[in-house]
Image (cartoon, rainbow, N blue to C red):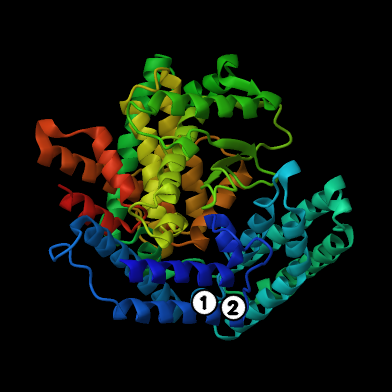
Amino acid sequence: MDALDALADRYVEEFAALDPCAATIMGIAGHDRALTDYGPEGFAARSDLTRRTLVALDALPCPDPAGDGDAARAEAARVAAAVLRERLETELALDEAGVREGCLDTTDGPVQRLRYAFELLDQGAATDWEAMGARVRALPGALESLRAGLVRAHDEGRLSPQRQVARSERACLELRRYLAGLAGREDARRAGLEEPAWAARQALGGLARWLSEDLEPRAPREDALGADRYRLGVRDFLGTDLDLEETYAWGWEELARIEAEMASLAQEIRPGGTLAEVTAALDADSAHRVRAEDFLPYIQELADRAIADLDGVHFDIPAPLRRVECRLAPADSGVYYLAPAEDLSRSGTVWWTLHPSEEEVVTWSVPAVMFHEGVPGHHLQLGSATLNTATLNRYQRVSAELYPGHGEGWGLYAERLMGELGYYRDPAHRLGMLAGGQQIRAARVVLDIGMHLRLPIPAGTGFHEGERWTPELGWEFLRAHCGPWADEQVTFEIDRYLGRPAQAIAYKLGEKVWLEAREDARRREGAAFDLKAFHRRALDLGPMGLDRLRAELAAAP
């Protein structure tokens, strides 16, 4: 175990040094002054680290829980070694398939990660301006490296499609605007950032023009990436192997089940009204609206109350996690959670985007989102892993971002769990959970697999039956199944799915594994089953792929 811990610790340090942007997102301390090299040399160095670590792991003796010594410690080592091996082998497969260097991604590509690298350092009065300044000064060089990597990816036929290039151009301009605002702050001027921020903005403008005028016209037009690339995405984001056509069919069934439940609930809220009429009435109801200036205290109170209610009753929440910080995102980046830094210099944080034009915020779907992002969702799950030095090595503690099936599956499970525990007493809040979380996640299973594999739309669905999926049909499908979204939001969703094959299905497929594992444990244990104990066992395992999660929970005593 000591040798494995040492290897895991060394891997985390080398990984963080080679990918500082990821390190900041993952909460790995000590790398906030640098930016990731997204050029050919950077990708080669990270691939080399993967190979070297896998060789070193192969050289370690296999932990044997049945042998002499501390069985519990050996069991923890067995799990830790298997989790690290699975991730390294997946990283190697991604490298060998050549999908990294040319990957531009609507939500998590290189430009987006560079933006997060600045946003996450931005702590208001508590901002480390030396670290921020170092990153601002490093940005032009990072962008040049990124350009070099994209040129090579294009030359080797590995560049992302045009719509992802266009989204990256927009991300450059968003980061440019953010840095303009940053440079205008008094603390930034005192730190001498005006001139470096101007140079960084110029570099961002130059990259945006190059992406738009030079690279985008030469990028592939075809968005669908096919079954082989999709299966690699399933392995990457979910840690499992799926029968894709069977999963596609299940997605249709699950979507129909959820929409039938929504229709029934709408009748309970407003008998005789259609679902669209009920949701419109809820949107207009002053009982479900909060002034924009009051929204941050509103969600903070929701988060605080959930922690107070659940701690010691349904979960034992560690003291450092009995507060999650809610903040408004400085750019239009949706709603997301970031775990506390491993040294607790950054608290667990829920970031929420409000549009400047919003004077009031509709709230009937907000409680479910906060349960997903806060407690019992990501804050409890990911924060517990960060703090668990007793049974998890350093890699396990900081690697939650690498396992969306595990993490987003738990977040969606947490939304449903709060309904089981009685936290949607207002039927509008339960409808909000279904409309805001369950329906869109089921629709993603259908749409993500359907678009990437160009599958036919089944008979009996009432939607373009027999036709094969295109982005245009995907747009229409979201319009039909996901409420009155603005056109830009629908377009963003389509671009997101096409840029990250299989990430969008991680939520619903992950939730499915959590629910099945819980029911399996309930059947095995009968009257002795204890939900709180099940959750404790599950969270103590730390992040991992879904196949391993299912196997470890099935083997639990």
Image height check: is 548 above or below 526? below
* Residue furthest front as drawn: 69
Q: Residue at x 56, y 42 (%)?
A: 349
Depth check: give the residue in front, 454 or 20: 20
Depth check: give the residue in front, 238 or 274: 238
The picture places residue 491, in percent across and down from the top left corner, at 58, 51
Per the image, label 1 sits on a secondary structure element best described as: helix
Q: How many residues crowd mark 2 within 10 Å: few (<14), some (14–19), many (20+)?
A: some
Disc number for residue 46: 1
The picture places residue 158, in percent across and down from the top left corner, at 53, 79
Q: Please indicate whether residue 497 sits to the left or right of residue 425 in the image.
A: right
The picture places residue 267, in percent across and down from the top left corner, at 38, 18
The answer to whether one can see residue 139 in this image is yes
Q: How many residues crowd mark 1 within 10 Å: few (<14), some (14–19), many (20+)?
A: many
Image height check: is 228 above or below 340? below
Pointers 1 and 2 in contact (CB under 8 A)?
yes
> Which image quadrant: the N terminus?
bottom left
The answer to whether one can see residue 251 in this image is no
Image height check: is 259 above or below 398? above
Depth check: give the residue in front, 557 or 553: 557
Image height check: is 272 above or below 17? above
Mark 1 belongs to which amino acid?
Arg
Q: Residue at x 55, y 78 (%)?
A: 43
Which residue does the numbered mark 2 point to in the structure image?
A: 42
Depth check: give the residue in front, 111 or 71: 71
Q: Quadrant of residue 61?
A: bottom left
Disc number for residue 61: none
Mark 2 belongs to which amino acid?
Gly
Q: Please indicate whether residue 112 sits to the left or right of residue 72 in the image.
A: right
Per the image, label 2 sits on a secondary structure element best described as: helix
Marks 1 and 2 sit apart, C-alpha to C-alpha, by 6 Å
